[in-house]
Amino acid sequence: MLRRLDKIRFRGHKRDDFLDLAESPNASDTECSDEIPLKVPRTSPRDSEELRDPAGPGTLIMATGVQDFNRTEFDRLNEIKGHLEIALLEKHFLQEELRKLREETNAEMLRQELDRERQRRMELEQKVQEVLKARTEEQTAQQPPKGQAQASNGAERRSQGLSSRLQKWFYERFGEYVEDFRFQPEENTVETEEPLSARRLTENMRRLKRGAKPVTNFVKNLSALSDWYSVYTSAIAFTVYMNAVWHGWAIPLFLFLAILRLSLNYLIARGWRIQWSIVPEVSEPMEPPKEDLTVSEKFQLVLDVAQKAQNLFGKMADILEKIKNLFMWVQPEITQKLYVALWAAFLASCFFPYRLVGLTVGLYAGIKFFLIDFIFKRCPRLRAKYDTPYIIWRSLPTDPQLKERSSAAVSRRLQTTSSRSYVPSAPAGLGKEEDAGRFHSTKKGNFHEIFNLTENERPLAVCENGWRCCLINRDRKMPTDYIRNGVLYVTENYLCFESSKSGSSKRNKVIKLVDITDIQKPLVFGAMVHRDEAFETILSQYIKITSAAASGGDS
């Protein structure tokens, strides 16, 4: 029975699928290889009984042998599998280390530099060979006699020795400086952009605020000097400045102030507590950065920083666009003043001595800074009339304002052409007043009839056809009564709103300009297309009416 077990070879898809012989005693012994034929020996009746008996001793011996064989094979397979996994992990780690080493050493760049150096060396070798070949040809063509050749060889050796020493001395003294002037190809380095981070964004905004703090403090101190925040300080500064300008010491004065400021900064850096500021500095409490933030807190933080950045960039864009429009003749009447002023300054610098020009400019700057600006800041209406730089700067438009003006002009042209096409021509017998009254009519009838006004009340020339707008009545609760669409007109004394809905004239509104107490452009004129034009027209007419009423009351 043992010999028969040695000759058995099991076949199948998996070794685990084999049935245990102890569990399946009826399994036959004929599942062997076809390569080795089995000779069935003659069995005695006793052996046949043992084979037939499922609980016989031979069956138990064979089952235990097969189990041991399966266990040893399964252990070997598990061991081989473990070795393969270890080898794969080692391969993966080695590949990662190789990739890191390649990134750190920049093998590609080194290889490219090595190729360039090789090409350069080959070019130099070719040039040296060409030079040597040309020299040998010249020597063979101009070969002197022997005596002369010896004398010339000695002289050449002496000259070559002297020239070599001279070159060596020059290279030792000035070789380093000559190497600094060697031209090299410019390398284009690409900066890596950092990903968006709320913490990084807030930190950059704080850095910007800290970096701009000295500049803002300097501007605040200058404004305090001009506003006479401290009377004694402004008086001393005005006296010192005017004396320095009168005696021609303005430039040394500014240089001395710069040296004094640097000296104070040095002492402050050394630990001295020195505060040299007209306006007292207010220290803002520094909030410690939070490490763990929720998603909503991060989102709100990003929104706050983005709002500050938006406002800052908007102010900077307005300043740059105004300067650009000033020099690009967007408004010729404003740029013409600058053009004339530059020509005057150029001619004055050509025909007058520099001392006189400097004295004039310095005195005007001091009086303007210390006296005229102080008066203008205390009297806004006087500043709006006579402060030329302020008027020019306020009247300079930005690019969004130019776009709004161009769109308003186009829409106004379309409205005038459409209204003129629908208005019939006036008869010959009508006078100018009747013609004007006929022209100033709305879509529903004459202007004075709709608003119950006198015939003298007509829309201004700016709003002949009115401005489309929305009337918002916050006292009403119904949506239909809350917002009304219509057209706005401005006369000399009234502000008229004509509702677009058909019906009685109760929906129309007439407001006296004298009864208006407050006008807010962002809120009231937010939904109008021509809000800037309407706001300026109403404000100017309101100021005109109120000033006339005040003058009439005083008289």
Image (cartoon, rainbow, N blue to C red):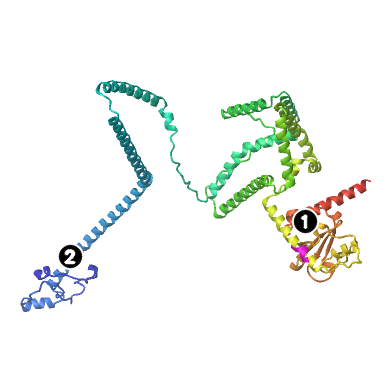
Q: Quadrant of residue 349?
A: top right
* Left or right: where 380 falls relative to 55: right
Q: Which residue is mark 2?
A: 69
Relative depth, front residue between 328 and 548: 328
- Does residue 416 belong to the magenta stretch? yes
With respect to residue 491, does 206 lie above or below? above
User: Which secondary structure type mostly characterizes the magenta part of the structure?
Assistant: helix
Dot 2: few (<14), some (14–19), or many (≥20) neighbours within 10 Å? few
Q: What element does badge 1 sit on?
A: helix
Residue 485: quarter of image: bottom right
Instruction: Name which residue type carries label 2.
Output: Phe
Q: Label 1: how many residues lie within 10 Å, few (<14), some (14-19) or many (20+)?
A: many
193 left or right of 41 in image = right
Query: Which residue is the extreme one toward the right?
Result: 555
Q: Is residue 224 visible?
A: no
**Quadrant where the N terminus lies?**
bottom left
Q: Earlier in the sequence, mark 2 or mark 1?
A: 2
Q: Position of residue 45 (x, y in %)?
A: 6, 79
Local SS, label 2: helix
- Residue pictured at 71% horizontal, 56% vertical: 406
How much space separates mark 2 and mark 1, taking CA atoms? 102 Å
Q: Which residues are magenta?
A: 414-418
Per the image, is 4 magenta?
no
- To which residue does mark 1 refer? 534
Residues under numbered marks 2 and 1 in contact, where contact means CB atoms less than 8 Å apart: no
Between 186 and 381, the one nearer to me in the picture: 186
Of the residues tagged 2 and 1, which is closer to the observer? Answer: 1
Q: Amino acid at mark 1?
A: Ala
Which label is found at residue 249?
Answer: none
In the rendered view, tell whether residue 15 sits above or below residue 195.
Answer: below
Position of 87 with respect to 524 (left or right) is left
Residue 47 higher or lower than 472, as above or below: below
